[in-house]
Amino acid sequence: MGKYFGTDGIRGIAGEVLDAELALKIGKAAATILMQAAEREHPSGDHRPRVVIGRDTRISCDMLESALSAGLCSAGVDVTLLGILPTPAVAFITTHTKSDMGIVISASHNTFEHNGIKMFGSSGTKMSDNFEEYMEFLIDNDSTIVKKTGSEIGRISDECDECKNEYLKFLASTAVGKYTDRIAIDCANGAASETARYLFRLLHAKFEIICDEPDGVNINVECGSTNLDYIKSMMKTGRFGIGVALDGDADRCLIIDENGETVDGDMILAVMARHMSNAGTLNNNAFVGTIVSNAGMDIFARENEFSFHRSDVGDRHVLELMYKLGCNLGGESSGHIIFSDYMTCGDGQLTAILFLNVLIQSGKTVSELIRDIPRLPQVMPSFTITGGPEQRDYILTHPALKEEVEKQERILNGFGRINIRPSGTEPIIRVLVEAKTEALSTEIADNIIKLMGTL
């Protein structure tokens, strides 16, 4: 992680860490890189870079969008504002419109006071480490920023409804048939509030949508993929065959079965891997998870005679390993699932459609579909960091923490694992423990977190 960039763009409390001044600098820095590339690739000067910007429903998005757009225009870049759209829609539109960059203003699954800025290149993939390092240099060195005057200043155009329609038609085209049971859909009061209703109408589905009335501050609040209580209560009424829970920017999807039980990203991956393997469409008969994917995935892969690989946490790292191994399926426990035959990033609504396809073709219920997927009891509590990066690094490198982990690993005796990592988007350290029982997993995690509090 750099000074500004975490595992998924630049994040912070809006108006505090991520304020209008920083957004302006980010816009200037991104535009400078685009203008430098345009000068190299189009020496005749006949290419003016264009950036498309989408956002979620947070109250701070207006402020950040305005400042970001101003920074881009000041360096000669044209901007198209897409309005409220899911993150994957912006990636799709970036490539569909042949734009030079796509930018999303969103803090994904976090609550409204947070916000973030993440970027896609012209190919619809997230930016490289080298790009982010250069961005950070430019943000802190304003004297190197490109500045335009007169007719060279960039312009801003309004929302592109046709772009949204093309995205929705693309998603609908991936469906293989009509799912006949009712579907419950939780939009997390986020970006999917603008798309889900239209999409599932295109699918001719019977559905009921909840949490699609954003007011600027209710995104991800007691709803969505980070809080499943509401949609689980709906599923337990027996009126629905499947529940779909999205997050604030709709790049994540969790499934709720007909009994109100959670199907997380690992289980979705397992279902899709088996289906694709049987169909002969799982490239290299392998798929990718992360270091926090449940150990049951390794067991499942062995039982089904395909390979399972782990990347670092973050959908960008998942995609990088997928490309390296030649895989077309990968994802995270949180519900970021990447189907690279269709998209260059996780797309919650696409995940829902492809999961529905499996249900239709299998003739099974959701619970029947996941019944034989093994799982070890897993807990992942967090330790809150109050002293910034210095405290984080001090704790993670402290000899006492290493000794405690080794002590707890001896208790596991080879039947489970411990993984400790800092979040790339929040001031916390996550402690993942898998053991034979949930009680033992919880006890070990609590002991480690207790020690962190003394350091």
Image (cartoon, rainbow, N blue to C red):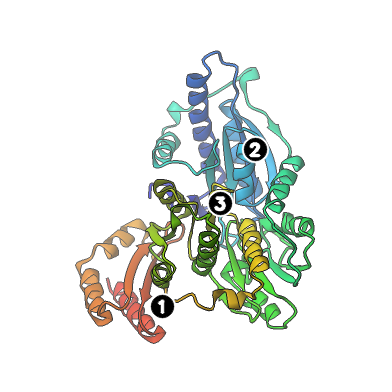
> Which one is in front, 29 or 317?
317
Q: How many marks?
A: 3
At x 71%, y 61%, the residue is 214
Q: Are marks 2 and 3 in contact (CB under 8 Å)?
A: no
Q: Which mark is residue 96?
A: 2
At x 64%, y 62%, the residue is 352
Task: Check disc 1 and give the amino acid type.
Answer: Leu
Mark 2 surroundings within 10 Å by alpha-carbon count, few (fewer than 14), some (14 through 19), many (20 or more): some
Task: Check disc 2 and give the amino acid type.
Answer: His
Q: Is residue 17 visible?
A: no
96 above or below 357? above
The CA distance from mark 2 to mark 3 is 33 Å
Horizontally, is 178 left or right of 115 in the view?
A: right
At x 62%, y 76%, the residue is 257
Counting from the top left corner in percent of width and height, residue 438 is at 41, 83
Q: Quadrant of the C terminus?
A: bottom left
62 above or below 222? above
Q: Are marks 3 and 1 in contact (CB under 8 Å)?
A: no
Counting from the top left corner in percent of width and height, residue 83 is at 70, 46
Task: Check disc 3 and give the amino acid type.
Answer: Gly
Q: Say what secondary structure mark 2 lies in.
A: helix
The CA distance from mark 2 to mark 1 is 42 Å
Mark 1 surroundings within 10 Å by alpha-carbon count, few (fewer than 14), some (14 through 19), many (20 or more): some
> Which one is in front, 233 or 330?
330
Q: Earlier in the sequence, mark 2 or mark 1?
A: 2
Residue to which mark 3 is pinned: 15
Residue to which mark 1 is pinned: 376
Q: Which mark is residue 272?
A: none
